[in-house]
Image: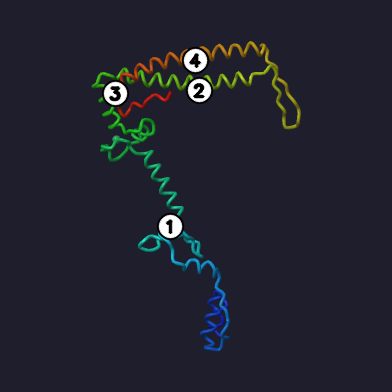
Amino acid sequence: MAKEFQKKFMHPTRRKLVNMVLTGGEYEKDTVISFANAEKSADNNRKKEVGEVWTDSEGKTWEQKDYGKVRVNELSETMSDVRAYLQQLNSCKAEDCKTIKLSRADKKLISKAGYCATCLAKKELEIKIDGLWEVYEDYKIYNNMISYGKDLIEKLNQAYNDAKQEYEFVHEDGKIEKWVLEKDVNEIKAEILTDITMYEGEIEQAKKLRNKAWKKLKDKNYDLVKPPVD
Ligand SMILES: [Zn+2]
């Protein structure tokens, strides 16, 4: 009876097989044993092309290589991509970097400038030796000014477009609160436009100076100097 008891917990297909074995040849000749996922397993047994990827009945993913099938773990592949990316963010860009253990300061520098402290100092020294340190600093400052100015103009444009004489706030309870600007909205808009024009002029000026610095730096192909973006 012990065998019968265990059979209850078997997979139906296996139980059928066990029954057949136990009963010898007493089963009907044309009994069809229905395998779960019969279709799928037939597909799994089909010969695979090299490079073919498929998932078996247990949910495992495989890839056919020319030497056989290998398990593909999609999640771990994605994770290793992510890990490689993070690794790249956390490692010095210098090909000849000899820093073995990165300090916190190194990591900070890497995220900002791409190089660890030692490599950055080396690259900076190159520029200093060439007598272009001030030019390099100017180049950085003007680039920062330009991008800051552009952000500012974007915000001013937004403010210009959003400016209204009267603002309405609808509260949750449906009550409407009105705010009225003391100053004439057209006057405010005119002021914003004046500011925009002023900043645009400053950006133009900064660009001229930036380009002047770039001219002196570009032929040196310093790792630390990227071409202007505009
Ligand atoms: Zn380094």
Q: Quadrant of ligand 1?
A: top left
* Tag 3–tag 1 contact (CB < 8 Å): no
N-terminal of the two: label 3 or label 1? 1
In the image, is 126 to the left or to the right of 71? left
| Relative image position of residue 67 (x, y in whole percent) | 35, 62
User: Which of 32 and 140 lies nearest the eye of the viewer?
Assistant: 32
Q: CA distance from mark 4 to mark 3?
A: 29 Å
SS of the residue under disc 4: helix
Q: Quadrant of the C terminus?
A: top left
Residue highlighted by disc 3? 219
Q: CA distance from mark 1 to mark 4?
A: 55 Å
Residue highlighted by disc 1? 72
Q: Residue 151: which disc?
A: 2
User: Residue at image x 40%, y 42%?
Assistant: 85
User: Which of 219 and 187 lies nearest the eye of the viewer?
Assistant: 219
Q: CA distance from mark 3 to mark 1?
A: 48 Å
User: Residue at image x 50%, y 61%?
Assistant: 59
